[in-house]
Image: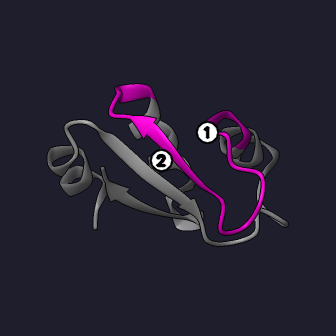
């Protein structure tokens, strides 16, 4: 799913899973992951549908699996 489709489908929030290791990624991307509350691979968090969270997902979406809540 693209970020636009996810944003339209999710009115309550997102269920975010870290699928790939952040090793070798830029420091800013690792900080975004920690801002989302993700530290370990296969860790699942729930975040609200806000523009800030959608921007963070867009930045590191290649490491994540995102589903609408």
Q: Where is residue 35 in the image (x, y as percent from the top left)?
A: 67, 34
Q: How crowded is mark 1: few (under 14 residues within 10 Å), some or many (20 or more)?
A: some
**Is 11 drawn above or below residue 63 in the view shown?**
above
Secondary element at image label 1 = helix
Q: Residue at x 72, y 67 (%)?
A: 41
Q: How crowded is mark 2: few (under 14 residues within 10 Å), some or many (20 or more)?
A: many
- Is residue 48 found inside the magenta-colored segment of the image? yes
The answer to which of 25 and 53 lies nearer the viewer is 53
Kind of element beneath mark 2: helix
- Disc on res. 36: 1
Q: Identify the residue at image location x=25%, y=36%.
A: 12
Q: Where does residue 67 sit, x and y in percent of width and height?
A: 35, 60
Q: In which quarter of the image is residue 25?
A: bottom right
The magenta-colored residue range is 34-52
- The residue to which callout 2 is attached is 57
Rendering colour mode: one colour
Side of 45 where 50 appears, left or right: left
Residue at 35% over, 27% down: 50
24 vs 28: above or below: below
Q: Which mark is residue 66?
A: none
The answer for how far apart the CA atoms under marks 2 and 1 are is 9 Å
Q: Nearer the viewer, residue 66 or 24?
A: 66
């Amino acid at each position: 799913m693209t970020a636009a489709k996810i944003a339209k489908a999710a009115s309550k929030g997102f269920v975010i899973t870290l699928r790939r290791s952040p090793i070798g990624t830029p420091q800013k991307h690792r900080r975004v992951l920690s801002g989302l509350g993700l530290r370990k691979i296969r860790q699942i968090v729930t975040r609200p549908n806000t523009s800030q969270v959608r921007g963070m997902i867009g930045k590191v979406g290649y490491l994540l699996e995102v589903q609408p809540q």
